[in-house]
Amino acid sequence: MKYCSECGGPVSLRTPPGDDRERYVCDRCATVHYRNPRIVVGCLPVHGSQVLLCRRAIQPRRDYWTLPAGFMEIGESTLEGARRETWEEAHARVEDETLYTIFDLPHISQVYMFYLARLGTPEFTPGHESLDVALFSEDAIPWTELAFPVIGLTLRRFFEDRRCGVFPIYRQTLLREDWSLLRPQVGIHADGMEGRRSAFMPTEWKDVGRHSCRRIHADDSRRHPSG
């Protein structure tokens, strides 16, 4: 940032009185310009045993597959934003949405929020930001062609939970080193050997999945009509 949006004067990076971190402050009118994290919202559309993915038509990660998602707009809720992005990128209408995964990415100042949603009617076409849109079963997911680690994490979590029959909310903080480690290196089938660590399924999440399966049979909560 070079100039103040209030008066057009030059700005400098310094710590305002009473603050604990540097901000851009106008040298002329003293307006403090705050830089806040950006929120990315999207849906995990489910039709029967399949999930809907979009192949990106824009950078970054053009030609890679993703869930329909994007930055929130001013004046909308997270759910409204997730529905809008699903329509814009896949021309798909979803229903029965429930908050499912939340990812904090402090190294890039972003928060990702995905809603688990039912795709009642399998009607969809690529939007202007998508090259293709398609339904995938678990064993057909292009794991090494997913755009971002949070996409793979959300998909792995979903298929684990689907076997259990319950879909609790998950929150994960991904640091810079986690982000690089989660990049897929090799193709891993969804029914891979027990104990083999997936590029998109941290060990701690696998453990949570197993524990929740036992809990599910005693506490039949948070079921989702994913069929």
Image: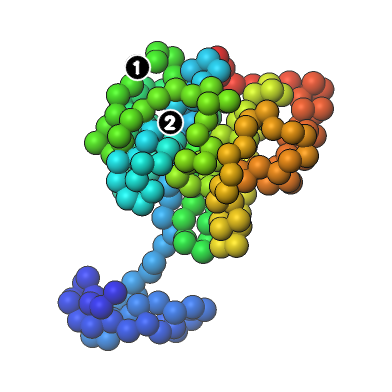
Between residue 154 and residue 60, name the one nearer to us: 60
Q: Is residue 156 visible?
A: yes
Quadrant of image for the N terminus: bottom left
Tell me what residue is drawn at x 42 percent, y 38 percent: 65
The answer to whether 93 appears left or right of 117 in the picture is left
Q: CA distance from mark 2 to mark 1?
A: 13 Å
Residue 70, percent from left and from top: 37, 44
- The colour style of the image is rainbow
Tell me what residue is drawn at x 24 percent, y 36 percent: 128
Residue 135, percent from left and from top: 44, 22
Three-letter code, disc 1: Glu
Tell me what residue is drawn at x 77 percent, y 27 percent: 213
- Which quarter of the picture shows residue 134? top left
Three-letter code, disc 2: Leu
Q: Which mark is residue 53?
A: 2
Quadrant of image for the C terminus: top right
- Which quarter of the picture shows residue 4? bottom left
Say if 190 sits above or below 64 in the image.
above
Residue 34, percent from left and from top: 38, 69
**Dot 2: within a 10 Å radius of its alpha carbon, few (fewer than 14), some, or many (20 or more) residues?**
many
The answer to whether 205 appears left or right of 102 in the picture is right
Q: Which mark is residue 123?
A: 1
Callout 1: SS: loop
Residue 171, percent from left and from top: 62, 46
The answer to whether 154 appears left or right of 42 in the picture is right
Between residue 215 and residue 153, name the one nearer to us: 153
For discs 2 and 1, the disc positioned in front in the rendered view: 2
Tell me what residue is drawn at x 38 percent, y 48 percent: 61
The answer to whether 55 appears left or right of 155 in the picture is left
Say if 59 sits above or below 11 in the image.
above
